[in-house]
Amino acid sequence: MIEQASLTLIARSYLKIALSSFGGGLSAWTQQIVVEERRWIDDREFLSGLALSRMLPGPTMVNFAVFLGSRLRGFPGVVAALTGLLVVPFIGAVFLGMLYFEYQHIPKVQPALAGMAAAAAGMSIGMGLKMLMRRPGNLAELLIVVAAFLLIGVMRVPLLLSLLILVPCALLLFRGETK
C-alpha cells in the first residue's frame, strides 16, 4: 500500500494540505491527499491514525502528521511532515492575525469568518459521508456516526462524555471484526 515517499514529497504534500485547508477542513484535505491521491495509507489506517491523534493531547492534525511521517520515513518523515504542515501556514496565520486585529471592526469581516467555518464543517461532513459510502451495508458504522452527531451536534453533550458513551458502544458493535 505504501508508495515510497521522499522527504521532499512528504513536505510538499503536507504544504498542499495546509494551504488547501486554510479556513478549515484539514481532516478532509488530509484524507483526500494522503489516502486518495498519494495512496500512502488506506481509509482504515487513516481513521485509526486520526482516532489515535484525537485522543492524544495537542492539535489533532499535527499529531496525525507525526503519525504519518513516522509511518512513512521515521523521524526524518516526521520533520518533513511538520515542516510542510506548519511553517508557511504559521507565517500566514501571524500575518492574517495582524490584519484581523487591524480590520475586525469592518462589518463584513464576521460574516466572512462564519462562512469559512460553515464551509469547513461541510467538508468534514462530506469526508465522513464519502467514507461511509465506501462501506455500504455496514449498519453498525452508520449507527455510531448518527449517535455521535446526535450527542455532540444536536444534544451538545461534551466530547469526553460522548466518548465515554460511544466507545463502549462501538466496541460492542465491532467486536470480532478483524478487517
Image (cartoon, rainbow, N blue to C red):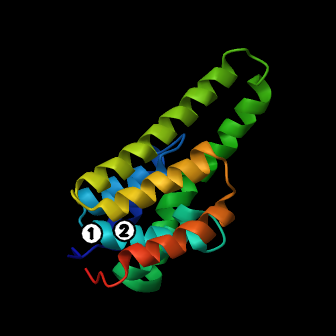
Q: In which quarter of the image is residue 139?
A: bottom left
Q: Residue at x 50, y 41 (%)?
A: 121
Q: Is mark 2 on a helix, strand or loop?
A: helix
Residue 48 visible in the displayed image: yes
- Count of labels in the image: 2
| Viewer-closest of 170 and 45 | 170
Residue identified by numbered label 1: 42
Do the residues bearing badges 1 and 2 touch, measured as CB atoms within 8 Å? yes
Q: Residue at x 25, y 79 (%)?
A: 179
Amino acid type shown at disc 1: Asp
Q: Is residue 100 left or right of residue 46?
A: right
Q: Quadrant of the N terminus?
A: bottom left
Residue 76: give x, y in percent of width and height. 44, 80
Occupied quadrant, residue 112: top right
Can residue 16 be seen at all in this image of the molecule? no
| Labelled disc at residue 101 | none
Using the image as rendered, state which of residue 78 and residue 34 is in the foreground.
34
- Residue holding disc 2: 46
Q: Indicate the position of residue 40 as horizontal and vertical percent values.
A: 27, 70
Q: Residues within 10 Å of mark 2 (few under 14, many from 20)?
A: many
User: Residue 113, percent across and down?
Assistant: 62, 29
Identify which residue is drawn at 31% across, 71% down.
44
Secondary structure beneath dot 1 equals loop
Horizontal side of residue 48 vs 154, given as left or right: left
Of 101 and 151, nearer the camera is: 151
> Given the image, on which type of amino acid does mark 2 rest?
Phe
In this view, the residue in front, 96 or 119, is: 119
Alpha carbons under labels 1 and 2: distance apart: 6 Å
